[in-house]
Amino acid sequence: MVVLVGNPRTQSRTHTAALQAAQAIAERLGLGAPAEVVDLSVLAPELPGVVPSPAVQRALELVAGADVLVVASPTYKGTYTGLLKLFLDRLPGGALASAVALPLLVMGDPKHALAVEVHLRPLLVELGATVPTPGVALLESQLPTAEEVLGPWADRVVPQVAATLAGGVAAAR
């Protein structure tokens, strides 16, 4: 499992929520190893280069090699961050074909709740990911008790994630 965090702030609330979501999914799937994390705030200075730095290249390979990929971003201007888009634009078409992706957006206003389905899901699908479940729209006001939202969400989506993995999406490598 890999967690991709598109918040420009290091150790952000989005980062924390993404790790909580990954943990909830991993526990229910019976995965023992902790998720590997790609925190784009750390890579931000290196992302605009024409040729990816070794750190960016490793991050791209880690994300492309994920069986389960949690992609998290705060909602900026009604969608995901430009930092996340800049990183994902470096992946070739189909790079996520072996991944089950789980989109997560953190937002201040519930009117942005559809952004996870209308903006982030299509981006992941365009890159070849299988997105078998609804994404998570977490309000900032829910972050102190995010487990109360993420636990029931994980209970709902894990059967679909497990079935997709068993069906060979990750085995397509």
Image: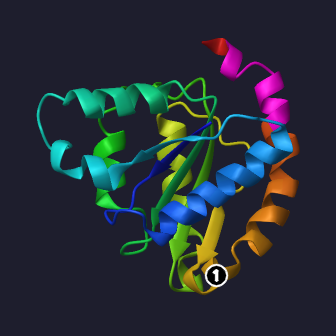
Q: Is residue 5 above or below residue 48?
A: below
Can you give x and y, in whole percent of width and height, for residue 100 in the image? 65, 35
- Mark 1: which secondary structure? helix
Q: Callout 1: few (<14), some (14-19), or many (20+) C-alpha neighbours within 10 Å?
A: few
Residue 165 magenta-drawn?
A: yes
Can you give x and y, in whole percent of width and height, for residue 59 in the image? 37, 33
Q: Left or right of 151: which side holds 145?
A: left
Residue 62 magenta-drawn?
A: no
Q: Left or right of 143: which side holds 13?
A: left
Q: Amino acid at mark 1?
A: Pro
Q: Bounds of the magenta span?
A: 162-171
| Among the 4 quarters of the image, the one containing residue 33 | top right
Q: Is residue 53 above or below residue 139?
A: above
Q: Left or right of 135: which side holds 94?
A: left
Q: Main secondary structure of the magenta part?
A: helix
Can you give x and y, in whole percent of width and height, for residue 142 in the image? 65, 82
Nearest the camera: 69 or 111? Answer: 69
Q: Left or right of 22: which side holds 12?
A: left
**Residue at the image position 42 percent from the left and 62 percent from the top:** 80
In this rendering, does residue 93 appear at all? Answer: no
**Residue at the image position 28 percent from the left and 34 percent from the top:** 56
- Residue that carries the numbered disc 1 in the rendered image: 144
**Residue at the image position 80 percent from the left and 46 percent from the top:** 27
